[in-house]
Image: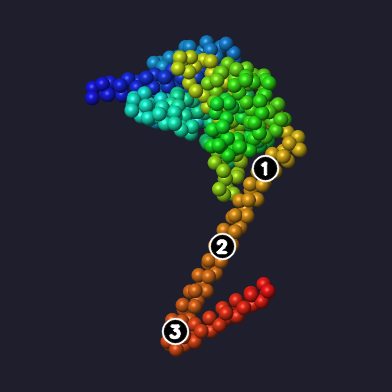
Amino acid sequence: MIIAILVHVWGRGKNKRKAKKWMAVHAPLLDSEFALVGFADTPKRPDRDKIQGDSLLKASVKLSGDNLSPDYLKEKTAAEYQTYATGRQNVAFMDVKLQLIKRYSPATLVGEYIASFFFESFGAPTDRLEAVLYTFDGREKEFVPPPVPGSEEIDRKTPNTGSSSYDAFVFAVVNKMSMRRLRDERYDVSLASTKDNPKLPNWATVMSESAEVTETLLTKDLISAIEQAGEDLEYLIVTDQPIDKPASLDDTVPKKRIQLSLKLPASEFYEACLPLFQAVIRLPDHLVSAAHFRPEVIRKITATRDAEIKKLKKVSDEEAEEERRKASEKLKKEERDRKMKGMSAEEQRKFVEKEAERSRKKQEKKMTRKG
């Protein structure tokens, strides 16, 4: 019993230290890019400047898990930590989740390893970063939260000189070990074609709806960041489509976002992934400036979405027609019941006989038309 308690305490502490170390390494970058990081009400430093190159690595070693502000990171469970960032041009907000191994529960951990051995759908337990960045796409006025205090400083440094919209598409750089699972589990990437790209390492592949999209997004900086992150990268997805296949017309409304999944290195050398994390944060700027494609490319991409919308519209129309039919039948039944309520037994008998006769004649007419 004492050993179980000690393992539990050690496991929780280990996860907390790993999460705080990750946050300490990435806090300078997040502070330089967003007006508000974490869950504080106001920014920590309104005079922040964007960090470049080697200065990013130098800034990351100034903080440690011990001197990190508690506002930066939230412990949702002993195996999940979260942070949040907002207040940036072209970006509505970013959610970051650290999903860690359940070190505090050896029995659960062993069960997960066994399940991953026998079932392909269960991945082996690993420490993982999942980040989702939601872009404005020209809709700032529709859903932007109240202005964040301090965001004016960033806006003056990176003035918005035009619309933040860009064309809709699905594009992904995927670790080949994750490719099959993603195609099976995600509707959005299933729309894209898979093709190796000579610019990428041999462990990675591209899933894209167009060669022009691939050429536009695979910039020199992004390729370099992917190479530095190495095979810890599971996927980087730029998408406007839902993860699950649309079940209604509402589900087909584009929701543009960027998703990143990385395995966290056991060595806790998180600096190797900093360039990729930075590239993802700045990717919306590139999308706004460059992701505007030729009409024929857009027609090809749109055709896939329109086909799905037509299927859903047909189903929706059939369901609406069925609802109308049921409503009509209900009204007729209520009217029939109302009439019969005021009749005598003999009148009711005659009424039912007339109904049966009318029904028989209708059936005969149908049979005649078929013949």
From the viewer's side, name the closer residue of 4 and 237.
Answer: 4
Amino acid bearing label 1: Thr
Q: Nearer the viewer, mark 2 or mark 3?
A: 2
Label annotation for residue 322: 2
> Is the residue under label 2 in contact with that under label 1 (CB below 8 Å)?
no
Give percent across and percent down for residue 281. Answer: 58, 25
Is 272 above or below relative to 369? above
Residue found 45% across the figure and 14% down from its top:
267
Q: How far across and down, in percent of the image, does residue 136 sit?
A: 60, 35
Q: Earlier in the sequence, mark 1 or mark 2?
A: 1
Numbered label attached to residue 304: 1
Give how far apart the Cα atoms at labels 1 and 2 are: 28 Å
Taking depth in this image into account, of 105 and 326 the one nearest to the observer is: 105
* Residue bearing mark 3: 342
**Where's the N terminus, which quadrant?**
top left
- Mark 2 and mark 3 lie on one chain; the one further toward the N terminus is 2
Say whether residue 159 is left or right of residue 109. right
The amino acid marked with disc number 3 is Gly
Label 3 sits on a secondary structure element that is loop
Q: Quadrant of residue 369?
A: bottom right
Distance of label 2 from label 3 (alpha carbons): 31 Å
In front of the other: 369 or 147: 369
- Residue 304 visible, this orientation: yes
Query: Residue reaching furthest left?
Result: 1
Q: Is residue 49 visible?
A: no
Quarter placement of the C terminus: bottom right
**Vertical placement of residue 80 versus 275, above or below:** below
